[in-house]
Amino acid sequence: ARFVIKIGMLNTQRQAVLRAQVTYKGLVAIGCLPAQMMVYMHDLLALTQSVPGIFAVNIAIFIGYKLRKFRGALAMALGTILPSFFIILAIALFFQQFKQYPIVENIFKGIRPAVVALIAAPTFSMAKSAKINRYTVWIPIVSALLIWVLDVSPVYIIIIAGVGGFIYGKYKHKYSSK
């Protein structure tokens, strides 16, 4: 039996703000969710896995929408996103004052390999799922060279790749159906 426990919007948003502070890469410890937040959880889990974006934001939006429609979704999204945004904004504002100190330089030198690993891991898993082979390996190589050597904006690369994929899909569908 499906049920919705009515709770106040401020309490719901407060829960989202608190949860946003303790999440890593958008992952929420589902077992730690309070009983009020377990609204249609089986539907929400399926939906949040099927839409792009951070899991915590997606589930917050769906919970907010179930509780208070658009206003609830907006409040929950802001409650989940804004704390991290303000923390990064505060760091960016004060970073210029402290970047010349040796300890700050050493901290960022130590963080650099972790950042590379955080970027490389999804890149390799995406490459596996993209089924890159000897016929398509040139696409990421040319894209990287255009960005790195010729200083082409990645936005243009994405647009060109999207248009190229669309044309290829139309061409392949047109000639594979005959």
Image (cartoon, rainbow, N blue to C red):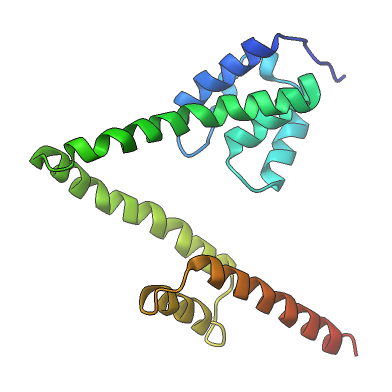
Camera-side residue: 174 or 151? 151
Counting from the top left corner in percent of width and height, residue 138 is at 50, 84
**Image quarter (top left, top right, bottom left or bottom right) of the C terminus:** bottom right
Please count the marks in the image.
0
Which of the two residues, 29 or 142, is positioned nearer the viewer here?
Answer: 142
Q: Image check: 165 left or right of 151?
A: right
Residue at the (21%, 45%) spot, across then down: 108
Q: Describe residue 173's horizontal placement relative to residue 81 as left or right.
A: right
**Residue drawn at 52 percent across, 36 percent down:** 26
Q: Where is residue 57 in the image (x, y as percent from the top left)?
A: 61, 34
Residue 79, compared with residue 99, is above or below; it is above
Snapshot quadrant of residue 144: bottom left
- Side (left or right) of 3 relative to 38: right
Q: Which residue is painted at 39% across and 34% down in the image? A: 89
User: For the point 78% across and 84% down, which residue is it?
Assistant: 172
Asked where in the image residue 176 lies, by quadrant, the reply is bottom right
- Nearer to us in this view, 153 or 23: 153
Residue 131, above or below 56: below
Q: Where is residue 135 in the image (x, y as percent from the top left)?
A: 56, 87
Q: In the figure, residue 49 lies in which quadrant?
A: top right
* Residue occupying the far right of the picture: 178
Q: Where's the N terminus, which quadrant? A: top right
Q: Residue furthest left?
A: 102
146 shown above or below 29:
below
| Foreground of the two, 165 or 90 | 90
